[in-house]
Image (cartoon, rainbow, N blue to C red):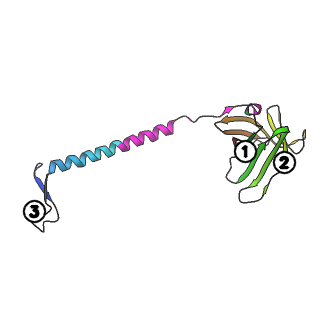
Amino acid sequence: MAGNEAVTAGDGGERPGAGVHRWPVSARLIDASSSRMQMRSVLLSLAVAAVLAGCSRVEESQPTAWSALGLQGKTLDLIDESKIETYRFAEQGLVAATLGTKGGAVAAPLYYWRIEGQALVISESPGQQGVEELVTPAIHGDVVSAKRKSGASVQYRLAKSNV
């Protein structure tokens, strides 16, 4: 068949002339070729976008001081798959805590909080040694990263308290 010969397409040719169309072969090849080119162009654009997104710089947290976060009236909620650790900071150095495991036991003690130097100290009584001490706070958006006294890194979501 030469490049410009007509091809008959239809319902199988059972009835002469019924549903029969004559298209030049070259027109069919151009349509299929342009569709493939458009698809390649879209796929190439998506691949370039994916590579560029993967190369984008990860924004880092900015070091801050606990006092700069204005904790009174705010909540720190631990970002963790299995643990619950939420602190709601109130007036007069009080902090309502919710501690436990997701799907397990939960406690809600009332503690005291203060800032000593660069540490956020949460204790059972004012001036007492902390049951929790967090140092080296850094913030990125609404996420506060810190280190526990033990050296373990933690992240909390900082939000305005509803109370």
Give the magenta part as a residue range. Answer: 42-68
Which residue is disc 1 drawn over? 162
Which label sits in the foreground, 2 or 1? 1
Measure the alpha-carbon separation of dots 3 and 1.
77 Å
Quadrant the N terminus occupies = bottom left
Name the element at disc 2.
strand
Give the residue displayed 33% in from the left and 44% down from the top: 40
Which residue is disc 3 drawn over? 17
- Give yes or no for contact between labels 2 and 1 (Cβ–Cβ under 8 Å): no
For residue 22, side relative to residue 76 (left or right): left
17 is within the stretch colored magenta: no
- Front one among 51 and 24: 24
Which label sits in the foreground, 3 or 1? 1
> In the rendered structure, which amino acid carries the disc numbered 2?
Leu
Label 2 packing within 10 angstroms: few (<14), some (14-19), many (20+): some
Name the element at disc 1.
loop
> In the rendered structure, which amino acid carries the disc numbered 3?
Gly
Give the residue displayed 14% in from the left and 57% down from the top: 21
Whole-percent x, y for residue 75 in the image: 73, 42
Looking at marks 3 and 1 on the same chain, the residue that comes earlier in the sequence is marked by: 3
Measure the alpha-carbon separation of dots 3 and 2.
89 Å
Label 3 packing within 10 angstroms: few (<14), some (14-19), many (20+): few
Residue 113 seen from this side: no
Q: Determine the image quadrant of residue 60.
A: top right
Which residue is disc 2 drawn over? 110
